[in-house]
Amino acid sequence: MRIDFTPSPRPTVGVEWELALVDRTSRDLANRASDLFAAAQPHLPHPERLHRELLRNTVEVVTGVCDNARQATGQMRDTLRAVLPVADELGLDLFGAGAHPFASWSGQQLSSGHRYEELINRTQWWGRQMLIWGVHVHVGLPERGRVLGVLNGLLNHYPHLLALSASSPVWAGVDTGYASTRALMFQQLPTAGLPFQFTDWAEYEAFAHDQLTTGVIDELSEIRWDVRPAPHLGTVEHRVCDGVSTLEELGALTALVHCLAIDLDDRLAAGEEVGTLPPWHVQENKWRAARYGLDAIVILDAQSNEKLVTDDLADTLERLEPVARRLDCVEELRSVDDLLRRGASYQRQRAVAAATGGDLVAVVDSVVTELRESLA
């Protein structure tokens, strides 16, 4: 099976941001995406940048093809500033996190469409549990032969991105003890979770052929890995991050993914060997970041050396600064430090819960307020 890859002539970036809709009074999820779409479309500068998703409680805001994180966040701001007044009129708020702290899956409605119906028909209970939201970052790459090397290299930084974005500590009213419940929930879907580490494109094509032949997938987009090639777009798609609640966080994470991917591609193009962690270390790092967030001690290499994730992040940010200058996203990359000082969303949500005696409505209020204030 041949899978063509459409090269990106420049190091582009694009972002998809999944947001939940919550009722302004109850703070529970609201299955009103259709109402929001119908009312918002006439007011949007680019209507194609607001998408429906699997469930009717969700909208996805996307960018066009951008040059850097600043341009991407600017496009997000423009779209969301047009959506917010419409949501206000409908009594809705936008909620940016990896999971809702108390919503029940049984009350959620599926969006219309054969693709969604087939997914739920196949996955059943696990599929119906997917009250989760994330951020996807596409980075344009120029050569098909280096795509899988970049993908494998990005897995070394999986725990850093998950720890920074982790925002789903509470599930169905219970604090799970995890920073990101979403990361472990999503991998229950068939073809989701960590990707296989292929050495060349022919192996990836053979894998896709087997998946299609045996009916595991009907099309390539149904390979739902945490990091995956998007051949028709000429990108590698990073899907590790939990949903975020501020534009600043979105910009920081976008800049970090963009710089990491381009740095890896540059090094591969120069003939450098980019070390890839063994799959068992990648799997353990994912679990540690999901469980401990920014307190995770991560495995750095095949020799099993370890370091606190925040310490390794500091080294990584310093190393990536020249790449950030070239991509014109120095400010956004440096804002990762601001995120570390402020605390990740899972930490902020737990702080609100502790201060209010476990009031999860107050937690939703805080997440909604963060998004609204970041758009001001």
Image (spheres, rainbow, N blue to C red):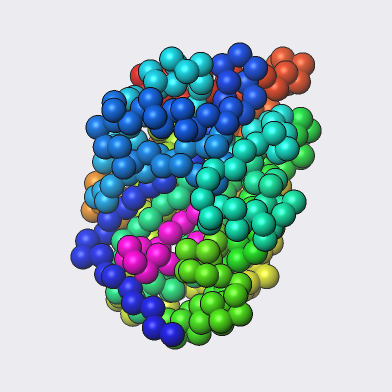
Q: Nearer the viewer, residue 254 or 64?
A: 64
State whether the magenta stretch is mostly helix, strand or loop. Answer: strand
Residue at x-position 40% and y-position 65%: 230
Q: Looking at the figure, which quarter contains the C terminus?
A: top left
Residue 3 appears in the figure: yes
Q: In the picture provided, is 189 more to the left or to the right than 68?
A: right
Q: Count numbered badges in the picture.
A: 0
Name the spot of residue 149 as percent of width and height, x first: 43, 74
Residue at x-position 26% and y-position 37%: 46
Q: Nearer the viewer, residue 94 or 213?
A: 213
Q: In the picture provided, is 310 more to the left or to the right than 28?
A: left
Residue at x-position 23% and y-position 53%: 326
Hey, which quadrant is residue 50 in on the image?
top left
Q: Is residue 233 magenta?
A: yes
In this picture, is 97 found above or below 91?
A: below
Hey, which quadrant is residue 25 in on the image?
top right
Residue at x-position 33% and y-position 31%: 41
* Residue at the left extreme of this rendering: 9
Hey, which quadrant is residue 345 in on the image?
top right
Q: Nearer the viewer, residue 130 or 97?
A: 130
Q: Is residue 196 magenta?
A: no
Name the spot of residue 373 as percent of width and height, x first: 43, 19
Name the spot of residue 282 as percent of width and height, x first: 62, 65
User: Residues in magenta?
Assistant: 227-241
Q: Looking at the figure, which quarter contains the N terminus?
A: bottom left
Residue 302 appears in the figure: no
In this picture, is 62 found above or below 203?
A: above
Name the spot of residue 307 as percent of width and height, x first: 62, 55
